Amino acid sequence: MNEEAQKELSRKEYWDKRYAEEHEQKKDDTSSSANYEWFKTFEKLQPFLAKHLPDVSRQPRVLHLGCGTSVSTS
């Protein structure tokens, strides 16, 4: 990625436009392929999460940070 493209990623306007465009695309595409992960899939993150997060029996609260257009559960 060139320097100008990296600078573009730091601009609020870039992300506003990108999310608006993806929102429109998602309305038109109801298939499961409309969702994707920007960072890593749960399968890739699960070993790390299992090691570092409290046991679910303790009912931890977890902040779900921007993870693409995946469906989050509460």
Image (cartoon, helix red, strand yellow):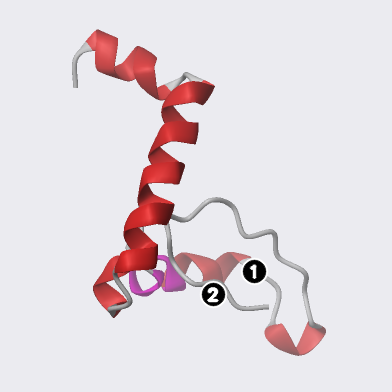
Q: Position of residue 25 (x, y in %)?
A: 32, 57
Q: Residues within 10 Å of mark 2 (few under 14, many from 20)?
A: few
Residue behind mark 2: 50
Taking the image as shown, residue 65 lies to the left or right of residue 57, namely left
User: Is residue 35 in view?
Assistant: no
Magenta span: helix, strand or loop, mainly? helix
Taking the image as shown, residue 54 lies to the left or right of residue 66, namely right
* Cβ atoms under marks 2 and 1 closer than 8 Å: yes
SS at circle 2: helix
For the residues marked 2 and 1, what is the alpha-carbon distance in whole angstroms? 6 Å
Figure check: 20 above or below 24:
above
User: Is residue 57 in view?
Assistant: yes
- Specify whether residue 36 is painted magenta: no
Tag 2: amino acid: Ala
Tag 1: amino acid: Leu
| Extreme residue toward the bottom, this view | 57
Give the quadrant of the C terminus.
Answer: bottom right
Magenta stretch: give its range: 42-46
- Checking the image for residue 61, the label placed there is none
Q: Position of residue 48 (x, y in %)?
A: 47, 65
Q: Nearer the viewer, residue 60 or 64?
A: 64
Taking the image as shown, residue 44 lies to the left or right of residue 61, namely left
Residue behind mark 1: 53
